[in-house]
Image (cartoon, grey):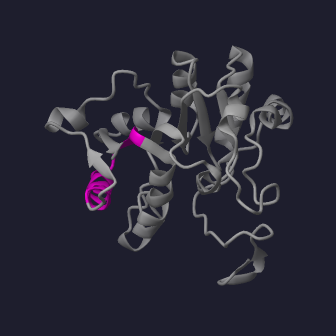
Amino acid sequence: MTNPKNPLKQAPHGAPWRNFYGRLHGKTLRKGQIEHLETTLKDITPPGVSWEENPERSPVDLAALFGDARPVWLEIGFGGGEHLMHMAQTYPEVGIIGCEPYINGVAMLVPRIAEKGVKNARVLHGDARDMLDVLPEASLSKAFLLYPDPWPKKRHHKRRFVNGENITPLARALKPGAEFRIATDIEDYVRHTLEHMLARDDFEWLANGPESWRNPWDDWHRTRYEAKAIVEGRTPHYLTFRRV
């Protein structure tokens, strides 16, 4: 489909046009990183996610992806991959899919996966919405959204991931009882998240008081974005929702 605002831009064949507003690349990649993107990344990219491969948007076979019917978790926008790597190593019995459109973040994570011999992580260099399209219904046991782009200006709030057009397909992919964890250092993103999530009847907020959102999860691993937030004097918040 053509971008209605720019007819020269085209979506993949058969795909709806989806605006993407975040960064896609940063500093020049090192030779070793490029080599891993050309080799390791190809081996751990989930097949059947791209529109070119799967224009019918048929559900992917997660058991085939990981070799068995293990629990599967999804991390939406893994940044530098610190948390994803920690979780994959801590829970080798779980399959973890990470989606990240920022190529420099992918280039940081993929070599570590190869060097540490991690076998239970899969990486999509691309939009998490494409992954949500093809996840089977009630297939995820847990999902993470950690330090998403806050889009602080009010006119840009529709760009935030926590919006109905994204949470609805995520809810479809989550099993009943599955956790959806959100971490952010932006108080207005907390407000925005609660406003949207508490208005839904397919999630419940797991909070018993301030300590519920002030303290991280027991298996939490700090990301580079959280470390930066703390240095700059911002307070992390940890929100947990359960799929009803």
Taking the spot 72% from the left edge, 69% from the top edge, the residue there is 15
Q: Position of residue 22 (x, y in %)?
A: 58, 58
Q: Confirm whether the magenta stretch covers residue 194.
A: yes
Taking the spot 41% from the left edge, 55% from the top edge, the residue there is 150
Q: Which residue occupies the foreground of this view, 142 or 100?
A: 142
Taking the spot 51% from the left edge, 57% from the top edge, the residue there is 169
Q: Confirm whether the magenta stretch covers residue 55.
A: no
Q: Is residue 139 visible?
A: yes
Q: Is residue 146 visible?
A: no
Residue 58 falls in which quadrant of the image? bottom right
Quadrant where the N terminus sits is bottom right
- Residue 18 drawn above or below residue 201: below
Q: Position of residue 111 (x, y in %)?
A: 73, 26
Taking the spot 67% from the left edge, 50% from the top edge, the residue there is 59
Q: Which residue occupies the foreground of this view, 6 or 231?
A: 6
Residue 43 falls in which quadrant of the image? top right
Residue interval drawn in magenta: 176-198
- Residue 134 drawn above or below residue 216: below
95 left or right of 42 in image: left
Q: Which residue occupies the foreground of this view, 56 or 100?
A: 56
